[in-house]
Image (cartoon, rainbow, N blue to C red):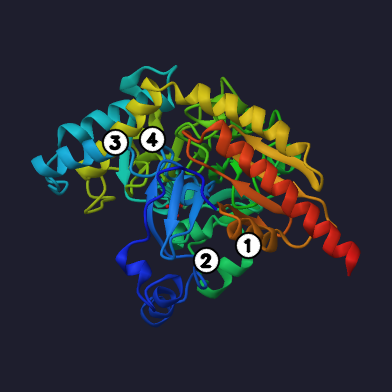
Amino acid sequence: MTHSSQAPAPTAEAKGPGTGNAGWLARYTDAVMNTFGTPGRVLVRGRGAHVWDADGQEYIDLLAGIAVNCLGHAHPAIIRAVTEQLSELGHVSNFFTTPAQVGLAEELVRLTFPDRPAQDSRVFLANSGTEANEAAFKIARRHGGSRRPRVLALQDAFHGRTMGALALTHKAAYREPFEPLPGGVEFVPAGDIEALRTALGPDVAALVVEPIQGEAGVRELPAGYLEAARELTEAAGALLIIDEVQTGMGRTGAWMAHHLLAPGVVPDVVTLAKGLGGGIPIGAVVATGQAAALLEPGQHGTTFGGNPVACAAALAVIGTIRSQSLLERVQQLGSAWSRELAAVDGVDQVRGRGLLLGVGLEDWLPPAAEIAAALAARGFIVNAPRPDTIRLAPPFILSDDDARAFTTTLSEVLARAQSEKVGS
Ligand SMILES: *Cc1c(COP(=O)(O)O)cnc(C)c1O
């Protein structure tokens, strides 16, 4: 399927026997640990919202590296920022700082806590979402020390795969092979204010929440929950940590999802990653008030965190979102598209905000992973975080035509699934 008139010719590699998708995948299996299952395709090139695989097939990328490539692939602003920074100075260690690092920290303070005086907030730069949450966990441990040994997280939460972030992650299949995990974490039902009230007390250091649970199938916390969480944590003297790794940096049409879902709620700590670097690995912890000063010299560190090339990429992402009015674009396309998707036969509901959408499928349909595979065969990259949900997290620069092409193909794929079912 061809979505653009300038589709590139397959590369020489893609033409040779054994060096298309199948050849690379065989080599992958021999060389790469089997932590992800076998990848669906071997991708060799990307431009904007489109990618090409090693067989030369073109796809519209509606997953964007799981909410990462917010400006799409090969965006000139990121290429320019990374190239210029790398040509000037590529890495320095945290014995030193760089203008890119300082500039990014200042931007993140302003974007995360727009209504607080900037001098009340501080940033720790890391390389990924899980590392940002590790640092947030250490901040929680430092808050109240042994008097506050408990940390609350939500059922179905996903916060990452390293041991601390994993301790905050709910899914048994992810946790159990690695127990014992750091202790003190308890899970409360997502969205249940009374359960939270009961669980909170003077021995709780922090509550960690995702405003929209992405890996759990794009499930938004109910209205009023974040407000109640802020009020109750404050009353108990506990920190409120909001994990915006997937939802932050414009993904929902606001810089932070909690700005949109609960304006007026000011958390103590926000974690960021995924879209922050537009495809260059970077994570961040942004803290305000006393939480911003809990980590003291020597208590935490990272070799690569705050690397100037990654910071330059993040600054380019922020600058482009601003100059191209992409928050407005995300809101406008997201709301129009979710209405269109909700009208497709077989779609039960569309959850989420902006360009983080969970398309809930009616229960008579085949598992969402099969639907996702059928969509891939027709040139659309999506994923299935749950057996009844297709997740869409495309680049913010996705065109109306590409979005519409997906809606049409989805309705064809679901209609075919229905007729096959009827025919069987
Ligand atoms: C993806 C994700 C993480 C983990 O980020 P990594 O960069 O994969 O370590 C943490 N929290 C949330 C909410 C996420 O979606």
Mark positioned earlier in the residue sequence (2 or 1)? 2
Q: Position of residue 241 (x, y in %)?
A: 50, 39
Q: Secondary structure at mark 3?
A: helix
Give the spatial CA distance, label 2 vs label 4: 35 Å
Give the spatial CA distance, label 1 vs label 4: 38 Å
Q: Residues within 10 Å of mark 3 (few under 14, many from 20)?
A: few
Q: Position of residue 232 (x, y in %)?
A: 63, 32
Give the spatial CA distance, label 2 vs label 1: 8 Å
Q: Is residue 50 visible?
A: yes
Kindly identify which residue carries mark 4: 286
Choose between 16 and 403: the one closer to the eye. Answer: 16
Of circles 3 and 4, the one toward us is 3
- The reply to whether the C-beta atoms of the residues labelled 3 and 2 are less than 8 Å apart is no
Give the spatial CA distance, label 1 vs label 3: 31 Å
Q: Amino acid at mark 1?
A: Ala
Q: Amino acid at mark 4?
A: Val
Mark positioned earlier in the residue sequence (3 or 2)? 2
